[in-house]
Image (tube, rainbow, N blue to C red):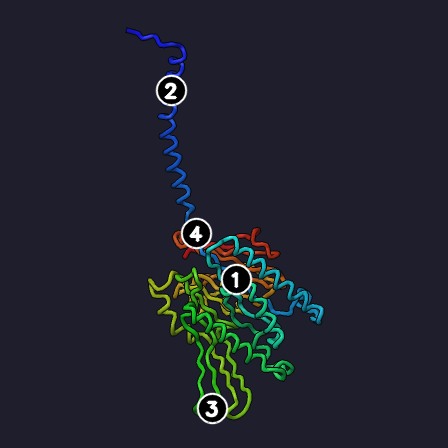
Amino acid sequence: MQTILPGRIAAALAITTASMRNLLTRVPLQAAALCLAFTSSGAYAETPRIMVITSDPQYPWTPATDAGEHSDLADKALAEALIREQYESIAAFRRNYPGQHIPVIVNGDLTSQAAPGEQEKIHDLLGVLGDEVYYGLGNHDYQNNLTNFVCSALTHCAIDALDNLAQHVHRHRQKGRVTDFDYAAFAGGLFTGLRKQGSWSYAFTPDGWEQVLNLQLNNSPDYAATINWGAGSASYRYEVTPSTPWLTQHLPRWSTPGAYDFLLVHVHKPDEFASGFRAPTPLQAMLATHRVAAVFAGHYHGRMGYYSGGFGAPPVFLSGSASQRTYLIVEHWPESKKLRVYGVRDNDPAKRELIREIDV
């Protein structure tokens, strides 16, 4: 028997039936889309650890000083403006990642001569980067000043630079970020004053990078010098030693499987780490054997990017300088086991370019 329904009811039922048919058709599609979105988002859900690497603020150098021109008092304002611009660029970049720790490394040559006014100015500018900045010394911070009569006659600039670095490392050590510091201070013995000895190199794990050990080697791993100041019980001796023995002693333990994912080396001068097509040096071979993924350096103001590598040697990257408005951004993708190194020009991280991707 066929039931005849009024027109409005029949129309309503027809619409309802069609709607149910469409709904039943859409549910699997929507579920599939939801699964696809979940899968797609899952593929990109990994968040990288980010680090910024700079070098050579070298206050009060400017592009003119890089070109060999004399830096006069007028250049100090420009030098400060260039450093401040770079550090504010980095600070703004960090603000794009709220809640994430983004450490900043400064690989040497903080100043031109480490004169008191220069050190005071650069430490004021480093304040723009906050607490999570880690620096090392370059040749301009202490090596050059050992033969600079004007600077040493003022206030033993190299000694001040070394003492400031020791204080910097101790502050990070108090917060649990420094695992080892190649430095000792002691009195007595044949030397009647105070002796400070070591390479001033240190191993650190910045907040957010606890599974990656960073090594700051300062000027160069083979650099050594002895600095004497004062007389009698008021005398000081600074014995700067190469960092290679420190590395030889600790790298086997640091590279033990399970200790860290990998290691990164920071240094000022890159040339001891550059092999090109030659066989790796003993130092390079030691780093490669002990899971050092990359070396980051400065010194050459006008060069930013990949510097050298070679067979059996970790790749070396340069970060340029504040005067040339360049630096590096490094991303560690722990689940993908990738390390990506980007170059920044004109202090514009939005336009950073991938330099190299490294399997870690």
Q: Is residue 182 above or below residue 57?
A: below
Q: Sequence-wise, which precedes: disc 2 or disc 1?
A: 2
Q: What residue type is labelled 1?
A: Ile
Q: In this view, does 240 lie above or below 355?
A: below
Going by the image, does 320 lie left or right of 251? right
**Which one is in front in this view, the residue at disc 2 or the one at disc 1?**
2
Q: Position of residue 205 (x, y in %)?
A: 42, 65
Per the model, the C-alpha gap separating discs 1 and 4 is 19 Å
Per the model, the C-alpha gap separating discs 2 and 1 is 63 Å
User: Pointer 1: what residue?
Assistant: 53
User: Pointer 3: what residue?
Assistant: 191
User: Pointer 2: what residue?
Assistant: 16
Q: Quadrant of residue 250?
A: bottom left
Name the residue: 47% across, 77% down: 199
Per the model, the C-alpha gap separating discs 2 and 3 is 99 Å
Q: Which amino acid does label 3 sit on?
A: Phe
Per the model, the C-alpha gap separating discs 4 and 2 is 46 Å
